[in-house]
Every structure is written in C-alpha cells, then in structure tokens.
Image (cartoon, rainbow, N blue to C red):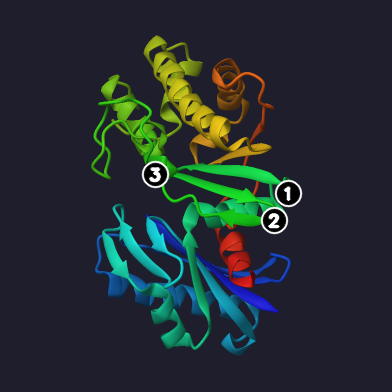
Amino acid sequence: MYYIGIDIGGTNLKAGVTDEWGNILGESSVPTGASRPQKEVFQDILLSAERAVYASGLSMKDIKAIGMGSPGKIDYETGTVIYNNNLGWKNFHISDLINDALNIPAVLENDADAAALGEVAAGSARGAKSAIIITLGTGVGVGIVFSGKIYRSSEFGHMVIRSGGRECTCGRKGCFEAYCSATGLIRSVREAGISEPDGTVNGRTVFDFADKGNVKAQKVIDEYTSDLACGLVNLINGLQPEVISLGGGIAEQGERLLSPLREKVRAEMYKGLSEPRIVNCTLGYKAGLIGAAMSAKQ
C-alpha cells in the first residue's frame, strides 16, 4: 500500500510518496507563494502530489490515501484549515478539494503533529511511548505523540512565556513563537544591532558572532535559550514526555544549543519528574512528509 504525504509550509509545498513503513519512494517540492489566494496554492499542492507520484514510478491508482500537514487551527473531522495566520487561510476545505480532484481519501493534520508522528515512526523518537517534537522555523510548531498516536495539541507555540511581551502574529503578546521561532531569533539579533557586513541576518548569524567572542551575540543566545527552556519546561511539567526532539534551522547548532538548554531545563523543571531526553530531530523536512503519510495510514 502506498500513501502521499503533503507538507504545507510557509516557504515550500513538499509532497512525498511512501510505502506503509514510511519509506519515501518519490518526492517533489514547489514554492508556496503564501501571499497568493488559497485556490492558487491548492493547484500547486495538486501539482506537487502528481510530481511526487511520477517520481515514485507509481500512478495515482496505486495510492490508498493522502495525508496533509498544515500549520494553523485545524478541523480534523472535516479536513478544514479553520485559520492560518502565516498563510492567511480561513475556512479552507482542503481535504474535500483533494478528494474531489483526485478521487482519493484525504486527511488533514496540523503540520507539527505530522512531523512529530514522522520522528516517532522513523526518526529521533523512534520507540518512545511519549514524545514532543518542536520545530523552530517560521513559527514554533509543537507536535505530541502518545503511544504512536497524535495528541492533537493545537497551538502550543502561542502559549505566553513573557507576559506583555512582543506582539505575535496571532494577536497576543509574549508568545513562545514570538521569541523562539527563527523569525523571533532574527528579530532579537537585529534588535541587538548584529548583522553580517552586507546587512543580512539568519538563524546562524548570532552563533557565528558569539563564536568570535561577540558579547552582545552571546547575550542574545543566553536569552534565547532561557526563553526556549521556559517553553519546554511548561510542556514537560504538564505532559511528562520521554523525549523532546528539536528541529528546524536553529536546531542545526546541535550541542551548541542543546547543552546550555538542557542545563536550564534541568534547573527549572518540577522536581521529582523524570528528565526527558532532549535531542535533535533526525529526519529533517522528511519528518513532515512521512508523518503526513502515516496519518493517512491511521
């Protein structure tokens, strides 16, 4: 049996065809063009799926089901994106549209939940009974899996970690996402007056400057890891996972990020709870594809 997994990101739409064990047989990617109308983006979702099937050497008649991972508030029963502030989507009945266009059953999950399922099925949290996978990207995606099943956790990226803090794209102030996403970190770097000679800033900039002894850069990193630890501890105290896996570009810093983060989590978490393993995700972008496909299998 074969499945299509579609990862709807703010930058790219990615599709992959998998077998029932999550092995990717073919994949495709096209730019999202997030500012475009929903209908235009939908056409590229279809195009990406068709290209992935072609790359796999299969045909659409071989596909049993399609799973999609999308950011935002999801109505899982109807397969509708109720609201996505980063893409500007409202009441997007995407599962029905996919089903009508391809005559294949389609299911919809939150993108972070799909990525979490992928990491548990085939990546950094394989075998864990409980895991939280956090993606530090354009936003902060938090996906939770208990006993191999997605815990539909909605938007933990929008829990407040600094009361009265920065305004978030969701309309609240002080959200986890406003500080700990790659977007939030870049904002902190710019506010500290740090940039490359050509004025560019990305998720690596502050770490590169800190490695060269820049005091302001190290301060930004210290504040960032404290904010990230605050969000993690809130999740640990409430959900007590065995594993927390971090993904996204910032997580590519590896132990440069993880070592101080573990120390801060250990100091802040509720005493008596078992300390989870805090590790890097291992599947990269493939987590979203595999997890979306495996959600269709479920």
Instruction: Provide residue 181's location: percent of width, then percent of height.
Output: 40, 37
Rendered residue at 71%/54% (across/down): 122
Image quadrant in which the N terminus is located: bottom right
| CA separation in Å, label 2 and label 1 | 6 Å
CA distance for labels 3 and 2? 23 Å
Q: Is residue 110 above or below residue 211?
A: below
Picture residue at 54% right of the left edge, 75% below the top: 66
For the image shown, how many numbered marks are present on the structure? 3
Q: Earlier in the sequence, mark 3 or mark 2?
A: 2
The residue to which callout 1 is attached is: 126
* Disc on res. 139: 3
Secondary structure at numbered mark 3: loop
Judged from the image, the secondary structure of the residue bearing numbered disc 1 is loop
Q: Nearer the viewer, residue 289 or 207?
A: 289
Residues 157 and 11: in front is 157
Q: Earlier in the sequence, mark 2 or mark 1?
A: 2
